[in-house]
Amino acid sequence: MSLINKIPDKPRDHCGVFAVYGVKSAPIAIYNGLFALQHRGQESAGMVVCDGKDMRYCKGMGLVSDVFDGDFADHLPGDIGIGHVRYSTTGSSSPVNVQPFLATCRDGMWATAHNGNLVNASELRDNYQKKGAIFQTSTDSEILLHQLADPSFFSKRDRIRQALAELRGSFAIVIARKDCIYAARDPWGIKPLSIGKLGDGYVVSSETCAMLQVGATFLRDVVPGELIKISASGIKSMRFAGVPNGRYGQCVFEHIYFARPDSFLFGQSVYKVRTDIGRRLATEHPVEADVVVPIPDSGVLAAMGYAQASGISFELGFIRNHYVGRTFIMPTQDSRTSSVDLKLAIVPEVVKDKRVVMVDDSIIRGTTIKKRVEIMRACGAKEVHVRIACPPTRHPCYFGIDFPDPSELVASGCSVEQVRDLIGADSVGYLSIKGLCSVLDQPQHFCMGCFDGKYVCETHNATNRQTLGKSCGGNVIDRYKRKK
Ligand code: SF4
């Protein structure tokens, strides 16, 4: 499957990771975990399972339910494993880039899965290539495997810590070995990663919603700069880096848009943060109106908060069609636009002759929201007031969130008034940075780079969408399917 026009009109995260140790039916638990993390990436999915001796894998392009068919679990015995769902921002959308990655080093097999974006990936990759290393993929994630196989690291006792300390940027990483798993989070904690308990075993997940799905209980987050090892001896915690300048840089967009509302993220409930954002938005941008209408699904909780705080009634003016394919894989702008039309259907009775407050999580290019405003007017809305649950998105993200080029970010070159004019609304109100900080427990520990242009680490020559060299292409043939 080749993907054209991948950059969506909404930001996308690019991966989710899940790992288990000491869990019977590991492949089923990983399947359920990945299924719950599907919103973090829909291009490909994969898992590696280990029975204490051998590692076996199954991976491919498509949704979790497509990649893992009926009897897949019978072919993946074991109680240790890691899984991954992917949306590509670094590296092309090719079968060869599907994670987890597996490699055999001098001391046996390693399997790795990564969520994030390494801003020094080109530099590290160049160094290895100069020394003759052969890369199989065009992703930044493969670098870790080369580090683990690096003879100069190999002699060191703590070679995983040594390798992680060289990485710059965002990463939540899980690693499987034949008798243990590892999990690590970048020193800024940009990407989320949590540990849970399941029976006598453990799970590690990008989001806590996946833990609940498999019946695990949340223990704690992996601390930024921490490497944990989970083995027969339990959890061992190690540090590979201190917190730079004493300040984390947790991605605030996780709370605004990416994470599932039933997740507990960076110490706060996503559900509560989103409804609090809506309440704050109502205080910052009040308006006389008859009805508050969310853009589903991402605007629902902020709209609820807005309605609660303003006393204006909340109505579902748009109904999502869950059976429409993903708009961002449509091959042309025309087909993508028509798919957007199919995805949300308006309920004319809700908006006819009404003054409407329309709430969405963010505006990226502005093309989709413009259509929504037009549809509202065509259905008889008297006024359309747009309220956005985050500050204007003016800058790119270098840490793995798929924003388009800054020139395509509508807020980057326009004032709020110009955005209003462009999308044809009666008024537009964005949440302020101060307002956003007011709903976060420890706002100083969040990255807001896409709003204020201040990033937690040096971004070197990284671009927001980088492809590192060429992948080998070809098809990944998963081991058990080849036997069939
Ligand atoms: S720049 Fe924006 S999207 Fe990227 S990590 Fe920071 S807050 Fe998240």
Image (spheres, rainbow, N blue to C red):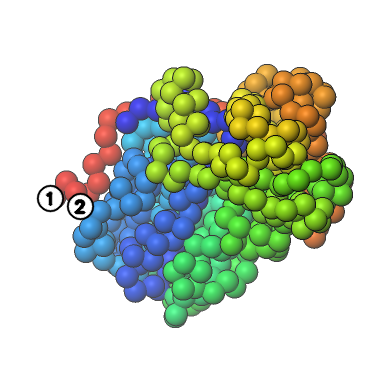
Q: Is residue 7 left or right of residue 323?
A: right
Q: Is residue 450 above or below residue 66?
A: above
216 or 356, nearer to the observer:
356
Q: Is residue 41 visible?
A: yes
Q: Is residue 222 visible?
A: no
Q: What residue is at 69 percent from the left and 53 percent from the top?
A: 314
Q: Is residue 340 left or right of residue 373?
A: left
Q: Residue 404 falls in which quadrant of the image?
A: top right
Q: Residue 42 falls in which quadrant of the image?
A: top left
The numbered dot on residue 484 is 1
Q: Is residue 187 above or below residue 467?
A: below
Q: Mark 2 points at which residue?
A: 480
Q: What residue type is labelled 2?
A: Tyr
159 or 249, nearer to the observer:
249
Q: What element carries label 2?
A: helix
118 or 165, nearer to the observer:
118
Q: Is residue 397 left or right of residue 100?
A: right
Q: Is mark 1 within 8 Å of ligand 1?
A: no
Q: Is mark 2 within 8 Å of ligand 1?
A: no
Q: Position of residue 399 (x, y in %)?
A: 63, 39
Q: State the CA–CA distance, disc 1 to disc 2.
A: 7 Å
Q: Where is residue 87 in the image (x, y as percent from the top left)?
A: 47, 39
Q: Position of residue 102 (x, y in %)?
A: 36, 48
Q: Which amino acid does label 1 sit on?
A: Lys
Q: What element carries label 1?
A: loop
Q: Residues within 10 Å of mark 2 (few under 14, many from 20)?
A: some
Q: Are marks 1 and 2 in contact (CB under 8 Å)?
A: yes
Q: Where is residue 369 in the image (x, y as percent from the top left)?
A: 64, 31
Quadrant the N terminus occupies: top left
Q: What residue is at 44 percent from the left and 80 percent from the top?
A: 200
Q: What residue is at 54 percent from the left and 56 percent from the top?
A: 206
